[in-house]
Image: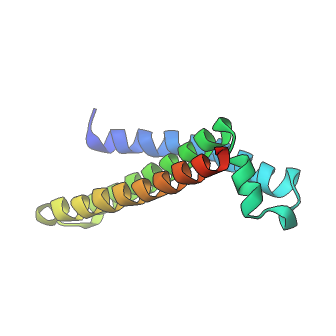
Amino acid sequence: MSGRTLAYLVVRLTGLLLAVLVTGHFAVTHIVHDVSTTDASFVAHRWSSVLWVVWDGLLLACALVHGASGVWVAVDDYVDVRRRRPWRSVLVAVTTLLFALGAVVLVVSAARSAG
């Protein structure tokens, strides 16, 4: 399987997962509950449930992988072959940093909500 085929499949799979995850997130946050009551205590209560920690973690991971895969393809399309490696390295570093920051916020906030 070529890298381009893998990127195509990753974008399609994460896009499908994002459709489900974002719809669920939107429904719970904006339809099931009144938007005016969506505050820090609402989020803290929601993150006291393992289901929502996993849900939001998957949402974070899928969004980052989906975006990074799309940018990877754009780099392949528009960047000269000799310059791709540094661009890809920056992309992987930024994606990893954003995932780490998001995971830390999610885990720390969930731990505070549970305790």
Q: How is the image coloured?
A: rainbow
- Residue occupying image coordinates x 10% and y 63%: 82
Q: Please tell me which residue is depicted at 68% across the width and 44% down the height of the picture.
A: 48
Residue 86 lies in quadrant: bottom left
Q: Foreground residue, 46 or 89?
A: 46
Give me the residue at 66% from left, 49% from top: 113
- Residue 22: image x %, image y %? 66, 50
* Horizontal relation, residue 4 to residue 101: left or right: left
* Residue at the limit of the structure toward the left, as seen here: 82
Q: From the viewer's side, name the closer residue of 62 and 103.
A: 103
Q: If the image is split into quadrants, where does the C terminus sit? A: top right
> Relative to 94, is 15 on the left or the right?
right
Determine the image quadrant of residue 101: bottom left
Q: Nearer the viewer, residue 92 or 111?
A: 111
Q: Is residue 21 left or right of residue 76?
A: right
x and y, in percent, of residue 62 in the image: 50, 46
Number of marks: 0
Q: Residue drawn 81% across and 58% down?
A: 30
